[in-house]
Amino acid sequence: MNLKHIGSTLKTLLTRLLIPAAAALSISAHAAQPLKIGYSDWPGWVAWQVAIDKGWFKEAGVPVTFEWFDYSASMDAFSAGKIDAVTMTNGDALVTGAAGARSVMVLITDYSNGNDMIIGKPGVRAIKDLKGKKVAVETGFVEHLLLLNGLKKAGMKESDVTLVNAKTNEMPQMLASGDVAAVGAWQPIAGQTMKSVPGAKPIYTSADEPGLIYDVLAVNPASAKQRRADWIKVAKVWDRVVKYINDPKTQPDAVKIMAARVGVSPEAYLPLLKGTRLLSLDEAKKIYVKGEGFRTLYGSSKIADDFNVANDVYKAPQDVNAYLDSSFTFAK
């Protein structure tokens, strides 16, 4: 065997050894990349802090990093491709998707169970008292939909009130000004609004229509497909979180963790938690089915889509089915 042949043989052997090794390193590096999830100040999303602080993602064998945002900024980050997933409402998942940032809702974390409110000024005791009066909501957003639902149940129409468009964080000042009879806001701004106007109280809340507002984990479709096994692990960690929060023995510790994340006392945070109905995977399975109305994620999302189009949030109806993937919730 001459030197040239020996050199060629060594080159072949090295190629056979190094290429698979390099490929393995590449795959390993990819697998080690953490899933990036954006979350914000809502009890159903702050709940993830329990798993973060307890190290449950590491125990589950899934690398995850959570990034804290203001709510609108979290959707912007998702739209810009800076994070793999974001916590948002089912209606807002359609909004971001219509603008080009498609997602799949792999997990229902909760539904609002009283934390979203139409708050009347003193003397306004019910939705019917709003007839002919001004109501401040952030038009095209979920409190607007909540108001329409309340009006419908009271036998009224949107035209029976005069809508005043204002940012949700402006609602304490709006009600205090005396220019409107009621405002729409979610917690903690709803609580701030009632403190700003003694005697103001909720006249209609999301507890009056369970399922009007579902909160979800919305994932970039490519990530959901490529990292399916990891997202299933994330869903199972969520199930552990819900059980820990709901267990009377461990709830005080969970509330302490959640309250610390948003900088309030556990005593102040507990009422906010009670206005949110956290959903275990078994509970979510009953909702993540095809059906009409607010009792299913499909039905609620269809209503949200109709609302978004009617209020020019976006022009064309979305294919709601394309946003839903229950297989992560039902995975064994």
Image (cartoon, helix red, strand yellow):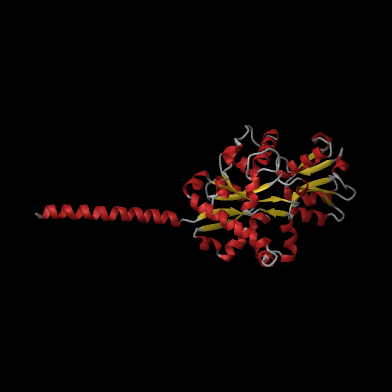
* Residue at image coords 13%, 52%: 5
Q: Is residue 190 left or right of residue 80?
A: right
* Residue at image coords 56%, 56%: 236
Residue 75, visible in the rendered structure: yes
* Residue at image coords 88%, 42%: 129
Residue furthest to the top in view is: 316
Quarter of the picture holding the N terminus: bottom left
Seen from the viewer's position, the closer of residues 63 and 233 is 233
- Give x and y (percent) for residue 114: 76, 51
- Give x and y (percent) for residue 279: 66, 53
Above or below 52: residue 305: above
Q: Is residue 91 left or right of residue 34?
A: right
Q: Can you tell which quarter of the image residue 248 is in?
A: bottom right
Above or below 256: residue 299: above
Seen from the viewer's position, the closer of residues 235 and 83 is 235
Residue furthest to the right in view is: 123
* Residue at image coords 79%, 52%: 172
* Number of callouts: 0
Residue furthest to the left in view is: 2
Residue 98, visible in the rendered structure: no
Above or below 304: residue 25: below
- Give x and y (percent) for residue 32: 44, 57
Q: Can you tell which quarter of the image residue 245 is in?
A: bottom right
Q: Can you tell which quarter of the image residue 145 is in?
A: top right
